[in-house]
Amino acid sequence: MRSTRAQSAGLLSYLHTALIIALAGLLVGALGPVGAWPQNTQAQSTDSLEAQVDSLMAEYDREDSPGAVVGVFQDGEVTFAKGYGMADLAHQIPITPETRFNIGSASKQFLGFAFALLAEQGALSLEDPVREHLPDWPKFSETVTLRHLLTHTSGYREAYGTLYLAGRVPGQDYLPREEALDVVRRQPKLEFSPGSTFQYNSTAFVILADVLEQVTGEAPAKWMEENVFRPLGMKQTSIEREVGQVIPKAADSYTDAEHGGYIQEASNRSIFGAAEVFTTVGDLARWARNFEAAEIGGQAVQERFQTPFVLTSGDTTSYALGLFNDEYRGLQRLQHGGAHAGYLAQVSYYPALEAGVVVMSNYDGVGAAGAAQKVSEIAFGEHMDPKSERARAKGGADVDSTLLRRYAGKYRTDDGTVYTLKQKDGTLFVEGEPLIARSDTLFQPKGSTAQVIFHLGPERKVTQATLRTSVGDTPLRPVQPWTPSAAELRTFAGRYYSPELETVYTFAVEDSQLVAQHRWHGTLRFTPGEENTFQAEEAEIQVQFERNKVGLITGYYASALRTRDVWFDKRE
């Protein structure tokens, strides 16, 4: 059995990544734990900007703390860059603008650009089936294309959630490239129809790196160096090829220790595509300049690279090829965040200003995404729409308390994620974050553009809710309370096996509660949700039991993190 601390540390790191990148803009509310909004968001000089950023990052500007580097750039030139905290606590090496950081999933944009470039050169088509470039690849009932992989709409399994069900700790257990690819090779069917759903998927970019190697005949790290980094003058950027590889001038990464202080994080993988790019503020400024200058590939490549994907429903996701193309305070923004093994990063570029902001951290408590938005306000506030901020900041609408009580409860997404909404003192909360009422049916987290919309049926009862974010709409279905009798609970006991994962969970009833034993997860206690559905208390695992025509349990579908519906047969 794994130690509780090991499991929780790896899972929390993974969940932090998910909150930054996927649909969890809903839950970050006021944009992370860093400071409060500066009173004056229109910096008039470099001195004023530095003073405000110093105030924002003061908590980490110490010799006994990891921290971050903050950079502002325009036209490819760094106009402000400063480090806060230590790059190496053991040897008291401070963070500077020249310090390199692993930017996690912000690395995806480089691979997205590579595929836009290769498509423009005629080396491949983004509409090519994945199997055309990977001959040993599984065939599913519907065709998955390279574009589906690049836009998180493939329907493939993601390695993290899938292997978590088997007992692996995301972000901690070693994950080689072949094992990540095998997750899809063993997948019996797609999780959804390709192109129909945006579901963030890092494994898709691992697959893309494999395709890149097949198409170019070169290792991805070498190809990127020769065709992207070197031509743009990104001399301080490199791709980690092996776990533990020494990256010159790279910051070590940290997380909080259980009993105070910090522990040094360790990477569990070195798989380019999903992450593994180490870089600096200066090099990211050079990279962002190419968004406008188009020195490599020309404007046709940039247009292909920056165009958001349109789902089969007609909804636009705001995700292009490894890059979000969205809007903030009235300005178009090209951006991506990342988190891996204690590193956090956010790269934001505003085309109308030909300027942007970078925040890179070696401590998973900094909140890089929120800090980048606040620095953007400080540096570029005079160019932003003040109306959008006032609209978010003003007081909410009055909503009848009876209606708020109806909204309170548990809501489930299609991938098994359950959100809990609570009502207290006339305010609705989701996972502890307050929601501001804009009308009787529309609510927003403070400081966020995300929306929660309630749909009412007869007698104003909630039929469904919708989570609306920049990547599209996610249905939230009310969880109908269900309390199984003691006799019903016993029917779920048994031994369940997943042929896909080759792992076993043994369920039993203890003290009137359904519990499961697993070789690596240990003992898991399950709480009932909807009928025949249970949620683990100690893990991000949901199970939905299936019955045959005579009511006997035949097995269950398990969902975890960003993986849904892995089948487990009842064997005993």
Image (cartoon, helix red, strand yellow):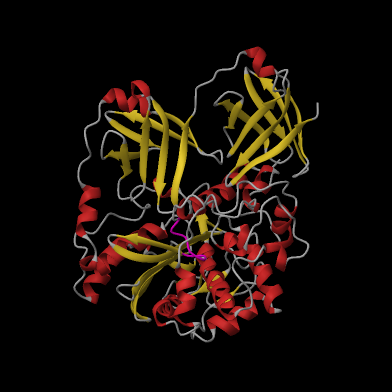
Image point (63%, 31%), residue name: 544
Q: Tell which residue pokes out farthest to the right in this image.
A: 572
Image point (53%, 73%), residue name: 113
Horizontal side of residue 42 vs 126, given as left or right: left
Image point (59%, 58%), residue name: 202
Q: Position of residue 68 (x, y in %)?
A: 42, 66
Read off the magenta span: 317-323
Of residues 520 and 309, which is closer to you in this image? 309
Of residues 520 and 272, which is closer to you in this image? 272
Residue 308, above or below 474: below
Of residues 552 and 108, which is closer to you in this image? 552
Q: Position of residue 335 (x, y in %)?
A: 42, 65
The quarter holding residue 571 reads top right
Residue 500 in the magenta stretch? The answer is: no
Residue 318 in the magenta stretch? The answer is: yes
The quarter holding residue 59 reads bottom left
Per the picture, the main secondary structure of the magenta-coloured stretch is loop
